[in-house]
Amino acid sequence: MKRILVTGGTGYIGSHTCVSLLESGKEVYILDSLTNSNKTSIDKIKLIFSKRNIDISNKLHFFKGDLRDKEFIDSVFEKIKKQGNSIDGVIHFAGLKAVAESVNYPLQYWENNVIGSFNLFKSMLENNCKTIVFSSSATVYGNPKDELLKETADINPINTYGSTKFTVENLLKNIFETKTDKWNVAILRYFNPIGAHVSGLIGENPISKPNNIFPLIINAAYEKNKLKVFGNDWPTYDGTCIRDYIHVSDLAEGHLKALDFLFKNNNQLINLNIGTGKGYSVLDLIKTFETVNNVKVPFIFSNRRDGDSCKLIANNLKAKQLLSWYPLKSLEEMCLDGWRWKLMNPRGYS
């Protein structure tokens, strides 16, 4: 049985990935500061399995702490070692992730995303753990010219968040290229995860004001507040930004597949786009959400937001070929599952 350390494991993507890891028989150790997440997600994960009459209480562990504190990371590895166990691999989600916020507070993003990652990688090396899946982002591509983005596209981040992600990618590349240590590294550049677990028990639960479009759509539909759509003058078919929306459960499966690939193939460094390969505008997403859930989403147009890109759509052929991974859920399912989560949990995990 493989033991996996998941940083940021109580968060939105992290919690869904923990479910996938546990379903595959792995033991999971979550490390999270709870800065923008809630420990209740762990109880909800356990409930998902208990409803199937599966007890995972001895396979799911939690440590509260911050990656900026290397002594804390070291202590986690030490505690696991004292139990007679060791970590086989790491999935690294932890970090700040709001594009607009990163433009306004760059120092916070560099400290959290880069220094935290540096501490993690150093502690991994000192504990002979050299297999990692890193949560990167399509924002590293900036404003691309290509219709479908390949992993070989130019890297040109246009906001602080994207810059920190690319810096960590480069750090991992440098570590991989050292002659003395053999690492296994998967860098997943994902596009726009939305939706929630089909059970409605776990979903997106931003502690601070949400910045991503989907929770804003959900809140507008539920609270009848007007959603701000940032820009209706983009060079697209309806004037709004186009994104590649992927169901969070499909994204979670991508992390599991990437991890298993690394365990089966030694000394790998892979960059993979994780998206559906289909682009939808903001207005497409709003209309689909309204139709499948039979609700109205009030909105107004606002000025463009600093750091936004016009169009980001994945060429996901490499992930399909290398991992045998395929996104299965439709945009309609993403909207249905996200709304179910909101109706079942009007105040999130509060």
Image (cartoon, rainbow, N blue to C red):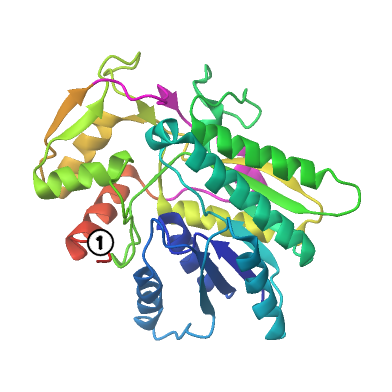
Residue 338 or 229: which is nearer the viewer? Answer: 229
Q: Height in image: 216 above or below 62?
A: above
Residue 136 position within the rendered picture, expressed as x and y whole percent measured from the top left: 56, 43
Above or below, 243 against 128 in this view is above
- Is 44 one of the magenta-colored residues? no
Q: Quadrant of the C terminus?
A: bottom left
Counting from the top left corner in percent of width and height, residue 87 is at 69, 71
Residue type highlighted by circle 1: Gly
Task: Report the magenta residues as a range.
Answer: 303-328
Mark 1 is surrounded, within 10 Å at the Cα level, by few (under 14), some (14 to 19) or many (20 or more) other residues, namely some
- Outermost residue on the right side: it is 180
Q: Is residue 156 above or below residue 318?
A: above
305 within the magenta span: yes
Nearer to the camera, 200 or 319: 200
> Would you say residue 324 is visible in this rendering?
no
Q: Is residue 283 left or right of residue 126?
A: left
Most common SS among magenta residues: loop
Quarter holding the N terminus is bottom right
Identify the residue position indicated by label 1 in the image: 348
> Can you give x and y, in whole percent of width and height, for residue 162 in the image?
53, 33
User: As displayed, is residue 307 above or below residue 23?
Assistant: above
